Image: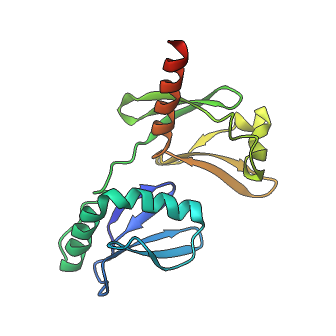
Amino acid sequence: MPILAYIDGMKLYVYGNDHSYPHFHVPFAEYRLKVGIETLEVTEGAPPRPKLARAIEWARPRQEQLLEAWAQARSGSPVRKNSMNVLPRITHAEPVIHGVMKLIFTGGYEGVDDLRPVIPCGRIWAFLQNPDNFGKVQIEEYGHHIFWIDEAIRREIDLAADGLPRDCERQAEVHMLMAS
Protein backbone atom coordinates (compact mmCIF):
# COMPACT_ATOMS: atom_id res chain seq x y z
CA MET A 1 0.00 0.00 0.00
CA PRO A 2 2.13 2.87 -1.26
CA ILE A 3 1.78 6.24 0.41
CA LEU A 4 1.34 8.81 -2.33
CA ALA A 5 1.55 11.87 -0.12
CA TYR A 6 1.09 13.35 3.31
CA ILE A 7 -1.41 16.18 3.15
CA ASP A 8 -2.48 18.21 6.16
CA GLY A 9 -1.83 15.31 8.52
CA MET A 10 -3.52 12.78 6.21
CA LYS A 11 -1.83 9.94 4.32
CA LEU A 12 -3.06 9.29 0.78
CA TYR A 13 -2.78 5.69 -0.47
CA VAL A 14 -3.55 3.48 -3.42
CA TYR A 15 -3.95 -0.25 -2.86
CA GLY A 16 -2.70 -2.77 -5.40
CA ASN A 17 -5.49 -5.28 -4.80
CA ASP A 18 -8.38 -2.88 -5.51
CA HIS A 19 -10.45 -4.05 -8.44
CA SER A 20 -12.91 -1.22 -8.82
CA TYR A 21 -12.73 2.22 -10.44
CA PRO A 22 -9.58 4.39 -10.09
CA HIS A 23 -9.51 5.89 -6.61
CA PHE A 24 -7.29 6.70 -3.67
CA HIS A 25 -7.78 6.20 0.05
CA VAL A 26 -7.51 8.83 2.76
CA PRO A 27 -7.55 7.24 6.21
CA PHE A 28 -7.18 9.66 9.10
CA ALA A 29 -8.45 9.71 12.66
CA GLU A 30 -11.68 7.71 12.67
CA TYR A 31 -12.43 8.42 9.00
CA ARG A 32 -11.85 6.09 6.05
CA LEU A 33 -12.39 7.87 2.76
CA LYS A 34 -12.32 6.66 -0.79
CA VAL A 35 -12.06 9.36 -3.49
CA GLY A 36 -12.57 8.73 -7.21
CA ILE A 37 -9.56 9.98 -9.15
CA GLU A 38 -11.43 10.98 -12.31
CA THR A 39 -14.29 12.78 -10.54
CA LEU A 40 -12.61 13.72 -7.24
CA GLU A 41 -15.84 12.81 -5.48
CA VAL A 42 -15.95 10.98 -2.17
CA THR A 43 -17.40 7.55 -2.81
CA GLU A 44 -17.01 6.24 0.74
CA GLY A 45 -16.86 8.04 4.05
CA ALA A 46 -18.10 11.34 5.41
CA PRO A 47 -15.09 13.54 6.14
CA PRO A 48 -14.90 16.93 7.79
CA ARG A 49 -15.16 19.46 4.96
CA PRO A 50 -11.84 21.26 5.58
CA LYS A 51 -9.88 17.99 5.41
CA LEU A 52 -11.71 16.88 2.28
CA ALA A 53 -11.17 20.27 0.65
CA ARG A 54 -7.43 20.06 1.33
CA ALA A 55 -7.16 16.53 -0.11
CA ILE A 56 -9.13 17.52 -3.24
CA GLU A 57 -7.12 20.73 -3.64
CA TRP A 58 -3.95 18.63 -3.60
CA ALA A 59 -5.31 15.92 -5.94
CA ARG A 60 -6.86 18.13 -8.65
CA PRO A 61 -3.60 19.13 -10.41
CA ARG A 62 -2.23 15.59 -9.98
CA GLN A 63 -5.09 13.53 -11.43
CA GLU A 64 -2.96 12.20 -14.27
CA GLN A 65 -0.19 11.15 -11.87
CA LEU A 66 -2.77 9.58 -9.55
CA LEU A 67 -4.20 7.53 -12.42
CA GLU A 68 -0.69 6.32 -13.27
CA ALA A 69 0.03 5.42 -9.63
CA TRP A 70 -3.29 3.56 -9.38
CA ALA A 71 -2.55 1.60 -12.57
CA GLN A 72 0.98 0.77 -11.35
CA ALA A 73 -0.33 -0.46 -8.00
CA ARG A 74 -2.96 -2.65 -9.71
CA SER A 75 -0.39 -4.18 -12.06
CA GLY A 76 1.88 -5.03 -9.15
CA SER A 77 4.56 -2.56 -10.22
CA PRO A 78 6.13 -0.64 -7.36
CA VAL A 79 4.78 2.84 -6.81
CA ARG A 80 7.40 5.13 -5.39
CA LYS A 81 6.59 6.11 -1.81
CA ASN A 82 5.50 9.73 -1.64
CA SER A 83 5.70 9.88 -5.43
CA MET A 84 3.32 12.80 -5.74
CA ASN A 85 5.20 15.30 -3.63
CA VAL A 86 8.02 15.57 -1.21
CA LEU A 87 6.68 16.79 2.07
CA PRO A 88 8.83 19.38 3.73
CA ARG A 89 9.94 18.36 7.18
CA ILE A 90 10.23 20.72 10.10
CA THR A 91 13.55 20.52 11.87
CA HIS A 92 13.11 23.44 14.27
CA ALA A 93 10.14 25.36 15.68
CA GLU A 94 10.57 28.25 18.07
CA PRO A 95 8.14 30.92 19.26
CA VAL A 96 9.51 34.38 18.46
CA ILE A 97 6.76 36.22 20.34
CA HIS A 98 3.31 35.04 21.36
CA GLY A 99 1.54 33.94 18.19
CA VAL A 100 4.59 34.06 15.91
CA MET A 101 6.60 30.94 15.13
CA LYS A 102 10.06 30.70 13.54
CA LEU A 103 10.34 27.48 11.52
CA ILE A 104 13.27 25.75 9.88
CA PHE A 105 12.68 23.01 7.31
CA THR A 106 14.83 20.35 5.70
CA GLY A 107 16.77 21.90 2.88
CA GLY A 108 17.56 24.91 5.05
CA TYR A 109 14.44 26.98 4.33
CA GLU A 110 13.64 29.27 7.26
CA GLY A 111 10.50 31.27 7.70
CA VAL A 112 8.21 32.97 10.15
CA ASP A 113 4.52 32.15 10.46
CA ASP A 114 2.31 34.70 12.19
CA LEU A 115 -0.62 32.87 13.78
CA ARG A 116 -1.93 35.92 15.65
CA PRO A 117 -4.85 36.50 13.25
CA VAL A 118 -6.21 32.95 13.79
CA ILE A 119 -5.50 32.36 17.49
CA PRO A 120 -8.48 34.46 18.66
CA CYS A 121 -10.83 32.66 16.24
CA GLY A 122 -12.73 29.60 17.36
CA ARG A 123 -12.56 27.25 20.31
CA ILE A 124 -9.82 25.07 18.85
CA TRP A 125 -7.32 27.91 19.21
CA ALA A 126 -8.38 28.92 22.75
CA PHE A 127 -5.55 26.88 24.30
CA LEU A 128 -2.97 28.88 22.32
CA GLN A 129 -4.32 32.23 23.52
CA ASN A 130 -2.21 31.70 26.64
CA PRO A 131 1.42 32.65 25.85
CA ASP A 132 2.76 29.89 28.12
CA ASN A 133 0.78 27.29 26.16
CA PHE A 134 1.93 28.71 22.81
CA GLY A 135 5.52 28.26 23.97
CA LYS A 136 4.97 24.51 24.44
CA VAL A 137 5.13 23.78 20.71
CA GLN A 138 6.48 20.36 19.73
CA ILE A 139 7.62 18.83 16.46
CA GLU A 140 6.10 15.52 15.40
CA GLU A 141 8.60 12.65 15.36
CA TYR A 142 9.13 12.78 11.57
CA GLY A 143 8.80 16.56 11.22
CA HIS A 144 5.47 16.33 9.41
CA HIS A 145 3.74 18.80 11.71
CA ILE A 146 4.10 21.00 14.77
CA PHE A 147 1.64 20.54 17.58
CA TRP A 148 0.50 21.51 21.03
CA ILE A 149 -1.32 19.24 23.48
CA ASP A 150 -4.20 20.63 25.49
CA GLU A 151 -4.13 18.14 28.37
CA ALA A 152 -7.32 19.53 29.90
CA ILE A 153 -9.45 18.27 27.03
CA ARG A 154 -7.00 15.69 25.65
CA ARG A 155 -6.78 17.36 22.26
CA GLU A 156 -3.86 17.92 19.94
CA ILE A 157 -3.72 21.14 17.95
CA ASP A 158 -1.51 20.66 14.92
CA LEU A 159 -0.28 22.45 11.82
CA ALA A 160 0.98 20.31 8.96
CA ALA A 161 4.37 20.87 7.35
CA ASP A 162 2.94 20.89 3.83
CA GLY A 163 1.19 24.24 4.33
CA LEU A 164 3.61 25.97 6.65
CA PRO A 165 6.31 26.91 4.08
CA ARG A 166 3.59 28.43 1.88
CA ASP A 167 2.30 30.40 4.88
CA CYS A 168 5.82 31.60 5.69
CA GLU A 169 6.36 32.69 2.08
CA ARG A 170 3.09 34.65 2.10
CA GLN A 171 4.12 36.31 5.36
CA ALA A 172 7.46 37.29 3.81
CA GLU A 173 5.68 38.77 0.76
CA VAL A 174 3.40 40.83 2.99
CA HIS A 175 6.38 42.13 4.97
CA MET A 176 8.21 43.02 1.74
CA LEU A 177 5.20 44.99 0.51
CA MET A 178 4.88 46.78 3.83
CA ALA A 179 8.58 47.65 3.86
CA SER A 180 8.54 49.14 0.34
User: Residue 83, how many percent across, how many down?
Assistant: 28, 57
Quarter-of-image position of residue 114? top right
Q: Quadrant of residue 115?
A: top right
Give the image location of residue 89, x and y in percent.
43, 42
Q: Residue at position x 32%, y 67% from top?
A: 2
Q: Quadrant of residue 137?
A: top right
Q: Position of residue 21 (x, y in %)?
A: 31, 83
Task: Please tell me which residue is depicted at 57% across the width and 71% down the height of the picture.
Answer: 47
Side of 59 relative to 145 (left or right) = left
Q: Is residue 179 above or below residue 23?
A: above
At horizontal 57% and vertical 60% (from top left) the residue drawn is: 50
Q: Answer with left or right where residue 180 lies relative to residue 132.
A: left
x then y, percent, for residue 26: 46, 69
Q: Is residue 109 above or below residue 35?
A: above
Q: Quadrant of the N terminus?
A: bottom left
* Residue 34 shown left or right of residue 45 in the figure: left
Nearer the observer, 53 or 161? 53
Picture residue at 35% right of the left edge, 33% below the top = 107
